[in-house]
Image: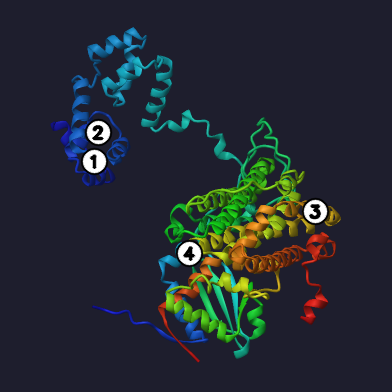
Amino acid sequence: MSDTASLQVPPDLAEVAEEKGIPLDLVRRGLALGFPADAIKGQLAMPGVTAEAAEQFIAAQEALRGPGGEISVPADLLEIAQKHDWPESLVKRALALGAAPDFVARQIEAGIKADQAERFIAQQEAARSGGLAQTLDLSWMKVPTEWGIRVRPGKRGLTVEMLNVSTYADIPDHWPYQTEMPRGAYPMKGVAPMGYSIYEKAELWSDNSADLYEEAIQRRWRPATDIPWASIEPLPDEIERAMGQLCTHLCERGLLAGDIVGRWLPEMSYGYHEVKLYLSAAAFDYARQFEVFRKRAMCNGGGLGLQSPGYFHRAIIDARAWTEASAVLHIFSASQLMGLYQIGAYVAHNEAEALIFSLGMQDLGRQLAYGVQHLRYFLSKKIDRRAEVHNYLNKAEAVFAFDDEKDVPLREALIILLGGGTSSDQVADGMAKLEYFKARWIRDYLSRLAAAGFPERREKLHPSLKKYVEEPAEAAAA
Amino acid sequence: MTQDVKTKATFPSVEWFNAIREIVNDDAGYKHIGTCDATVGIKIPDLEKYYRLTFEAFEVSDVSEATETEAENTDFWLEMPYIKWKEMIENIEANGKADLHHTLNTLDIEDPEDLARSNDGYRRDAFYRFNQTFQYFFDTSARIDTTFQ
């Protein structure tokens, strides 16, 4: 003990020991056993370390050592080591590093081979002597990516868009890598391609993607607890059935949209992660759409209704290019869906329904924002493909018109909801209001296309939709 | 027993919007909704009163009186005659928040020309994207003592 009393304890180690309530004499005994000060400090700093546990450990280590510091292997451990072809010298090295005899015995019996153990022990010994770096390759540290980046959080926190600084802000028009390498990393030779098909920025980009991702994350909501379900009270049977039919349709649309985005995400190369991030969040929004309307359908004594004809669903999912899928899903379909949400908000019978449709509008608003900005970007880069976009929309509008005509259950459900019942007066009122809502969403659809740099769509709109559009002269007269 | 002292303000005025702004900027419930970045015009044409509200991150960063053009040079503007604004605010005060017939959504839907208007179809969608933030802002008027001019 007199030897240990003279050992100096470094101030930082003494500080940690004091924080943990470990006597300095115990620390000195550890130093006397040959444990480096940094190693002791690291051990003491670990959660749950007590003076009692430290005393037990040090005492056990002292018991293993003879007067000259020579390690003696306990007889039972030696027997186990010999049985498994572990040299005694290797066991001694493990014990010298501070491993408890029963721990070493368990490792041996667990099947760790002596050569495996030797490599690990050599690493630990090198680390203890400060020579760890010599055992590592470290060439990866010299990779020529930009280093020294220090992005600070702003008013909105640390956002994805804020990470686009210096060379990390370089978003190429064509992504040259076929692997899962993130933008800004350095490519590794020999990595197999991942099979993406979209490598051109114009085919998927929208300038607002990073912000939309943050917005989706920030403004997320939980149908289970954020909706005041208790505010829903029994409704007349025809109203509940109509609401169930609308919910059935909205559930289908949610699952379908999730399938579409899920199908296209693996096609998008990693150079445009902002888009992939937002669409991943949008897929979550679609799942929530399904969830909340299924819950609404099944929380008030009703249930689900009849399946939709599905012609329009297939028109979207059959799109052969992402820009087609996006223009149809995020602008055309989302505009019509926004119209249905507006009907839902208008006819809301309670706070729960009003909130469901209002929160749904927020989610849908982001999808529209992506769709409009992507189409705007696409058209600005592909000026020779405007006719192609007309063709996408020609097909979508025509199939929608056909589907809309066939979907009698949805139309009648909307009429009942808007009119408030099934009497002649109510049906007449519901039909008139349905026309009003149709005119609104078609007007907004064209307005969004105009914002995307596609105002001429107004002239090519499908006849079944065009009849709802007020011509500029009529609008001025009104 | 203490009683909350409500700020008094007259609608429409910068002071009225600022009184709400001060409350929401210090309100965890408002921040919980999430970030909102939008400039919103307020138009009360029959009084020729116009305002601009700037929603930025987790706060309302600015409120100002504006010209009609400035109110329209926003993401979107909310436009109603004075009597409709008064009805909405009185409804909010009576119920603690807008009832189902006086939410911004409902008022927007019921107006063939919309409550939320814009010269840009993309920017107008901010009305939907941040709908709950705007509703929270106006619902907060229940926490001030509004007088009408």
Asked if the residues shown at circle 1 and circle 2 are in contact, with their CB atoms under 8 angstroms apart, the answer is yes
In this view of the protein, can residue A27 be seen by the observer?
Answer: yes
Q: Residue furthest bottom?
A: B149
Q: What residue type is labelled 2?
A: Leu
Would you name the residue on which mark 2 appears? Answer: A31
If the image is split into quadrants, where does the C terminus of chain A sit? bottom right
Report whether A52 appears left or right of B127: left
Instruction: State the residue position of label 4.
Output: A351
Query: Do dots 1 and 2 share one subunit?
Result: yes
Instruction: Give whichever of A241, A435 is nearer the camera.
Output: A241
Label 4 sits on a secondary structure element that is: helix
Chain for numbered disc 2: A
- The circle on residue A9 is 1
Q: What element carries label 2?
A: helix
**Which of marks 3 and 4 precedes in the sequence?**
4
Q: Kindly report the distance in space between the C-alpha atoms of the residues bearing marks 4 and 3.
A: 36 Å
Tell me how the rendering is colored: rainbow
Chain containing mark 1: A
Would residue A160 be visible to someone looking at this image?
A: no
> Quick one: label 1 or label 3, which is nearer the N terminus?
1
Q: Where is residue B68 in the image (x, y as percent from the top left)?
A: 65, 85
Gap between marks 1 and 3, in whole Å?
A: 83 Å
Residue A85: image x %, image y %? Answer: 37, 9
